[in-house]
Amino acid sequence: MSVLLTGGAGYIGSHTAVELLNLDKEIVIVDNFSNSKMSSIENVKKITGKDVKVYNADIRDKEGIDKIFKENNVEEVIHFAGLKAVGESTEKPLEYYDNNVNGTICLLEVMKENNVKKIIFSSSATVYGISEKLPITENMKVSAFNVYGRTKEMIEYILKDLYESDKTWSVVLLRYFNPIGAHESGLIGENPNGIPNNLMPYINKVAAGKLECLSVFGNDYDTPDGTGIRDYIHVVDLALGHVKSLEKIKNTSGVFIYNLGTGVGYSVLDIINAFEKVNNLKINYKIVSRRPGDIAVCYADATKARTELGWVTTKTLEDMCKDSWRFEQNNN
Ligand code: NAD
Ligand code: UD1
């Protein structure tokens, strides 16, 4: 019996692959390598000393995916595959709806045909839009306000409707907060193409001297130091949330929604300070105006994942900063 990971060569998928292999689970990876490289799989093998079955395929290729299901005894699916750049999603909405929403429908059709009805889906805290109160709990209303977020919201509805039509499905919707960090080996991590949009990859490039200066988007928010606050979570803790979710869906059916965050918010200046301190270097930064679409504060109430999944985060902000920088130094 194996677990199929769509998008398993990517940032979060590769870390989850490592944790599953460490537990001797059989895994199959399907990825079209649109935002990853085969070398990440080679590094997963290096870290774990285990072999990995990998297919270069697109989830929208139903015939190809069906063949993969038939060749492998797939029991569960962890569905990471998707496009994830918020800005790009606004410029290319059709590409995002096709890849993320249509891609998921294709995958679900193949799953149904093969009687595989257990799925863990990579959703995002972005579905909450501007939350009515903090910390954010899973029962708060969802109202994404960009194309990327809407693809996640739509897929959540599709999975819920699918369950309503057939109560033998078992679905976990994981709403990730802000994943950063890398595996402590320094072999796998986040390596975005071009100029990064997100905070930690940008800090890494400034630290490495590849970009001159970090722009801090606003210091006039209603927060203690005026900069935006987010719930940063180490990618290895996040990966372990998938391991726990797999245990959950093994013998149950239903739709289960979990926030995966630490429950603690850090400001942009907190992150810069921690990064400088643990890595003993200086980050050149300047305060600029707010980034359109940004919210002031966002952090999770992760109680539900703790009580229902027995999942707790163990990595600190210092671990996140140290591991991110180690990966940057090793790989670029
Ligand atoms: P990533 O881009 O590193 O990984 C996604 C992988 O999916 C890539 O390897 C890509 O090549 C593959 N892929 C994309 N479209 C595909 C398709 N049609 N067929 C097959 N493979 C395809 O991204 P990540 O950070 O690892 O994110 C994984 C998932 O988690 C995504 O769905 C993303 O939207 C979601 N998510 C990520 C974050 C984050 O900050 N990283 C936050 C919330 C949710
Ligand atoms: C981003 C995504 C969101 C996704 C989330 C999880 C955007 C607009 N949103 O959220 O959909 O769910 O990641 O990974 O991309 N910042 C700077 N300077 C920078 C970059 C960021 O000051 O160069 C600040 C931002 O204003 C924010 C914080 O750092 O306060 C974090 O930003 P970022 O890493 O981009 O994540 P989010 O915007 O929270």
Image: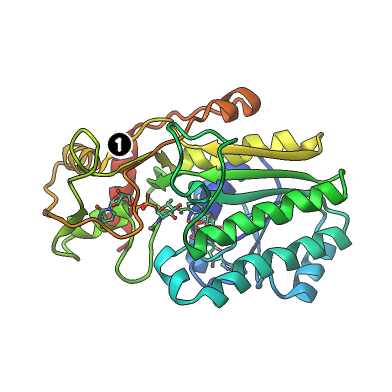
Instruction: Say whether residue 80 is visible.
Output: no
Q: How many marks?
A: 1
Residue bearing the label numbered 1:
266
Q: Taking 89 as reference, is 271 above or below it?
A: above
Q: Quadrant of the C terminus?
A: bottom left
Q: Is residue 96 above or below residue 112?
A: below
The residue nearer to you, when weighing 144 against 64, is 144
Please tell me which residue is depicted at 29% across the width and 41% down the height of the picture.
322
Q: Is residue 113 left or right of residue 9?
A: right
Residue 9 placement (x, y as % from top left)? 55, 61
Q: Give the class, few, some or many, for how many residues have Cα within 10 Å of label 1's Cα (few <14, many ≥20).
A: some
Q: Classify mark 1: helix, strand or loop.
A: strand
Residue 177 in percent (x, y) is at: 46, 43
Please state which of residues 40 and 66 is positioned toward the viewer in this rendering.
Answer: 66
Residue that sits furthest to the top in the current view: 307
The quadrant in which residue 267 appears is top left
Q: Residue at x 52, y 74 (%)?
A: 93
Left or right: residue 56 compared with residue 287 = right
Q: Residue at x 57, y 64 (%)?
A: 82
The residue that appears at 62% across and 73% down in the rendered structure is 98
